[in-house]
Image (tube, rainbow, N blue to C red):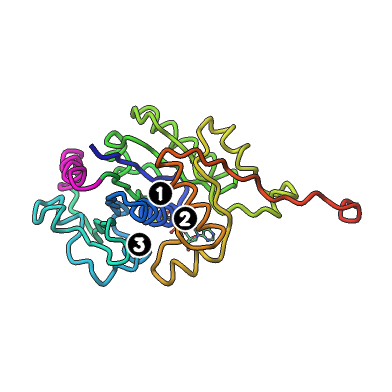
Amino acid sequence: MSRITLITSGKGGVGKTTAAAAIGAGLAAAGKRTAIVDLDLGLRNLDVSLGLETQVFWHIGDVLKGTVSAEDALVRSDRYPNLMLLAAAQTVRQETLTKEALQRVLTELSGMAEHVLIDSPAGIGECFQLILPLADEGIVVTAPVVSAVRDADKVLHLLEEAGVRKRSVIVNGVRTELVRTGAMMQPADITDVLGAELLGVIPDDDAVISCANEGRPVSGTKTPAGQAYDRIVRRLLGEEVPIPPLKIKKKGWFRRR
Ligand SMILES: Nc1ncnc2c1ncn2[C@@H]1O[C@H](COP(=O)(O)OP(=O)(O)OP(=O)(O)O)[C@@H](O)[C@H]1O
Ligand SMILES: [Mg+2]
């Protein structure tokens, strides 16, 4: 039986799609058959992040409608033979977006993949509410800023209420220098406030942007963000991989003044 993981956030633009692409590619590179579902309906992004946009023919809207099977709609990656993508629809007819139809799609994908990752839209809208009870696990991505953390708290509570037992947090976009000066929250303080497991800490890294522009996931690259995502993948696969401490230089005598 496959594991269905919802990658979500309260606030938008905090790195969910980047995380879905990186974790999906990382799991696939580790030999796990992985399907990523782009549920950010209306805003198709994941296919571009994975460099698969020219191969998308069918999308989740067609599968929800019953025009094609999920198997036929999946886009396969040459670079990652174990990776499959179900692309988002630009529009979905409201009457086809039901919990039952989503359940049917996920059941079909579960038969084909060991891991099903869902890249959800930001916030707690209708689509989020429908998919929530179907997830086994929730990964909440947050930026280390108060507004994002407050919204992450709300999402974590909704996951808990929906009975999603395994919930964890990725703190994305950490800038060590700002943490040092106290201008940015410490990841460990964030998970203390949220009362959730810290799955990983991703630095703010230009490599994320260049990889996104080249249409390749950042995991598997020798960059700070890539290596942080590789550690997350290993943790998801059950390995004990400690979160390295932030390299915060102690203030020197001169800098203290
Ligand atoms: N660790 C990082 N360092 C630098 N840039 C990053 C990092 N993570 C994400 N970004 C950039 O931030 C932007 C938003 O990321 P992304 O699209 O993954 O967020 P999202 O949560 O999926 O957004 P939305 O809510 O709109 O779906 C992108 O341009 C991405 O390349
Ligand atoms: Mg997104």
Bounds of the magenta segment: 95-113
Magenta span: chief secondary structure: helix
In the rendered structure, the answer to whether residue 154 lies left or right of residue 28 reads right
Task: Check mark 2 vs ligand 1: CB closer than 8 Å? yes or no.
Answer: yes
Q: CA distance from mark 1 to mark 3?
A: 13 Å
Residue 167, percent across and down? 43, 34
**Residue of label 1:** 122
Task: Check mark 1 vs ligand 1: CB closer than 8 Å? yes or no.
Answer: yes
Give 206 or 219, whichever is nearer the viewer: 219
In the rendered structure, the answer to whether residue 170 lies left or right of residue 93 reads right
**Residue of label 2:** 13
Query: In the image, is residue 248 above or below residue 136?
Result: below
Task: Check mark 3 vs ligand 2: CB closer than 8 Å? yes or no.
Answer: yes
Residue, x 60% and y 42% (percent of image)?
Answer: 187
Give 95 or 74, whichever is nearer the viewer: 74
Residue 137, percent across and down? 36, 36
* Disc 1 versus disc 3: nearer the observer: 3
Q: Secondary structure at mark 2?
A: loop
Q: CA distance from mark 1 to mark 2?
A: 8 Å
**Residue of label 3:** 45
Q: Earlier in the sequence, mark 1 or mark 2?
A: 2
